[in-house]
Amino acid sequence: MYPILFLSFSGLITLFLGFFQEGKWVKPATILFLAIASISAFIDWNKPGAYFFNMLQVNNFNLLLSLVILITAILIVAISDNFKEIEYAHSAEYYAIMQFSLVGAIMMTNFQSLIMLFLGVEILSVSMYVLTGTDKRNLRGNEAAIKYFLLGAFATGILLFGIAMIYGGVGAFEIDAISGTLASNQAQSLFLYIGLVMLLIGLLFKLAAAPFHFWTPDVYEGAPTIFTLFMATIVKTAVVFALYRILHQSFQNMHLSWSYILAGCIALSLIIGNLSAVKQISFKRMLAFSSISHAGFLLLGLLHVSKTADKSLLFYSVSYLLASTSAFGVLLALKNERTENGRSNENISVFKGLATRSPFLSAVLIISMLSLAGIPLTGGFWSKFYVLTDAANDQFFYLIVLALLLTAVGVYYYFKPIITVFEKSDIQEAITINPIFKIIFVLTTLGTLVLGLFPDLLYGMI
Amino acid sequence: MEAVLIIKGIIILAIFALSLGIAAYETYFERVVAAYIQDRVGPDYAGPAGIFQPLADAGKLFFKEDFIPALADKSLFILGPSLAMLTALLTSAVIPFGDSFIYEGQKILVQGIEVNIGILWVFGIVSLGVYGILIGGWSSNNKYSLYGAIRAASQNISYELAMGLAIIAILMMTGSLSIRSMVEAQHGFNWNIFYQPLGFIIFLTCSFAECNRTPFDLPESENELVAGYHTEYSSMKLGLYLFSEYVNMFISSAVIASLYFGGFNYPGMDWVYSKFTSIWGATVGHNWATVIGICVLMAKIFFFIFLFMWVRWTLPRFRYDQLMDLGWKALIPLAVLNMIITAAAQLSGKPLWIGLILTLIIMLVIFLPAIKKRTVKA
Amino acid sequence: MDILGLLKNMTITHWSFYIVSMLTLFGALGTIMSKNPIHSVIYLILTFFSLSAHYIMLNAQFLAAVNIIVYAGAIMVLFLFVVMFLNLREENEELPKNSILIAASIVGGIIGITLIAAIRQTQIEKVNPYSFNTKTGLVETLGSLLFNKYLLPFELVSVLFLIAMAGAVMLGKREKGERHF
């Protein structure tokens, strides 16, 4: 609750900070604001309840979610490096919009009323549309922003229509009221079913799950890398937990109806994500398709209403956040490597010879790739393990088999960058890494390894 | 009951006829005022002092050839002027032209409809007014018409914002959207102009712009765009466009008079009311007092119509970028400022003259540098 | 004969409802069927207008006025403005492929059928005219709802608008060295 209020104001302050000393203070201030926001979240610790006439729900799990989102944001802001890669950068605006978008993300995880969900989705998406198009001189970026905006606005429209339908069926926006109506064992209004399907379409679009994934590769590739990272981590986490609250805490009695839709989406996401990622040359595009397959895995964790679903989802999100941050971070650290047309080289070939040029970066990259692929001793393995054990159930047995098979495919393409790292390159000069980057990399890589070696540290804590 | 309905019907018809009739005679006044300002004689052929000039004009327009360009979009070409006239006439429905008539113990309001959302209705219809111009200008399939139409659209959108913000200050003072309750809150000499001088200036400027009158008549500026959006129009279609402008002027004057100058209220109205009721009895006295109120409102409306004409024949036209700058960089910030001051004054509970002095000081602080710059340059 | 009887029994509210609904549908169909984008926009304005009439019949005067001001008065003017600037004429318009048309009509048809089924299945609560609060839908009620129950979302909408505004200014701003248009 308090991070929402705090970030709404701190975003404003950040906008004004852009005036002073050419925005030198914007980045440190943003990190400070995010840190204060994280601390302010603890005001509600062990005080479960609802705020503002049942608009927001506060409990320890939700608080943990906000904390995960805020800490990821701190990591991302720390490696953002004042946007030197963007021509005509307006860094104060970027940082302010990032803070505002976190308001949306936290609303999406803590909502109690569907109105708050809609608003959160809208705040998060509008900021993402803007941030996607920030590199104004980049035609691909413009294309990506327009594509994302048009499709995203349509998806939001469907989501809103779905909320209206649910209101028509129940007469209330609160998810408690919805689950109460569903538990009453009467014949339910058809509006509820239509509404749920539309709500799912809207949210699955934002999650980039197939068959609503068409925007993902272009947008991930076109957006500046730092915002791609933002999209891949924070947006995904927020949407997954919004889905968790809707499916597991309000529509759990309609499990039979939605689980088949979800199963279809999971199968499609896994197949499309993993198979398309195989032939990608661009690293960002590859990660885009990999994010589609990860969306499939996250949905797999939602498939079965069980008591451990929240734990495994949070574990999956955290390990995915850490691995993605390292992977995109390495790409950001290498942004001075140019292709012939003067743009940053974002193909997998940029990692050529990294093992000799910077053993540190290559270790970070390798561990993140291993974690994304789900190799044991990394967080990625345990996250897949927990999600699959949750979903293990007679009903969707074939899905688990499919997931395992496609994980094997995943190992193939995640190893491509790893192999490239050890290839010989003409350039031999060592790469200098910003000390802040170093700290972040150490943190994320250590986090991935710790999650892999002692999963109970996080899994048992929740 | 029947009789009440009939009287209501008569009132509505009267308002309708009044807006048309006044609009017709505004054309005459415009010529007279222009002639006076330019030291000419003006219309004097048709009837004594040219009093039948509007009739002659209408007759001329009716008998002219009704021409539709070959490449024009025919249906829209006809729709344009009709829409302009329709939107112009719709607004008068919610304006209270007088207090009420009492008939058989029932009060009949001198107003088309008394609705909860009066000012929003005016605002909504005014914002629709631009469609007539836009559609007409586009469908003429003429470059100049299109330019005129596009200018009209951007001008209206820009000035609507400041207008709405100026109205919000009034809304905060009255706490109601109904124009009648706004007027009733200004009982006697308690007019809003004394509390909202800045709001009045903003509203007046914006209503000039919304009516496309000089100095804001860029959609039809003759030395740039031939005749702007109605270049291709002739006969009564052109007549409708010109006519709708005069109707708009009448309605704007009525709205300004109601919002800022007390509508049908006038100083000493209570004394007049008590005298009338003591002479003629409660019913007839009330009705006569209402008639006086209507006359007072009409006088105010005519004053503002005169102001419209006065400004038209004395001020030169803005350049387009000046127009946009005035709208976005001057009027909107001022309107926001006005809103904040009003809100603060309302919340503080202090007497309003403190707010007034504060407004003056802030206006001085804002305008003094500008004035100084002017004098330095001169 | 049955239809005639029905027509006779219709009150003025029924009549206005059916007329306004027909207008709405006419406008909506015109929007998607007309080839000229300007005609489309004008049909859309008609649709918004008749929707406002529906709001008034539902005793939501404020919503009706705001719908006219915001949609018909501001957004559609901008729409028309942009379409006129682009000067799209019928000649340079391509009809979408048949396959898209067929797929779209199938999807639309399915949603339509489901919605009709849902409406048929629902039992609509009759409003009791004696206990009905006539202030429902008026500004005062709406305002007190917005500033009590829905205070948090109402205030947070401002964050959304601020993002949209800052983003639009940032993306649309002419940078140093860029040429004038």
Image: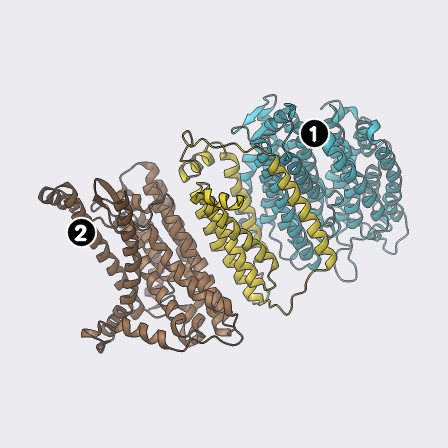
Looking at the colours in the rendered structure, which chain would you say is drawn in brown?
Answer: B
In which quadrant of the rendered view does residue A199 lie?
A: top right
Question: Relative to residue B107, is residue A254 drawn left or right?
Answer: right
Seen in the picture, residue C86 relative to B266 is either above or below; the reply is: below
Horizontal and vertical percent for residue B198? 32, 52
Q: Residue at x 87, y 34 (%)?
A: A401
Which quarter of the rendering shows the C terminus of chain C?
Answer: bottom right
Contact (CB < 8 A) between labels 2 and 1? no
Tell me, yes or no, if residue A358 can be seen here: yes
Which is nearer the eye, B276 or B58?
Answer: B58
Question: Under tag 2, what secondary structure?
Answer: helix
- Dot 2 and dot 1 within a common chain: no
The residue beneath circle 2 is: B292
Residue, far front: C1
Chain of the residue displaying label 2: B
Chain of the residue displaying label 1: A
Tell me, yes or no, if residue B332 can be seen here: no
Seen in the picture, residue C129 relative to B132 is either above or below; the reply is: above
Looking at the colours in the rendered structure, which chain would you say is drawn in cyan?
Answer: A
Seen in the picture, residue A313 relative to B286 is either above or below; the reply is: above
The residue beneath circle 1 is: A254
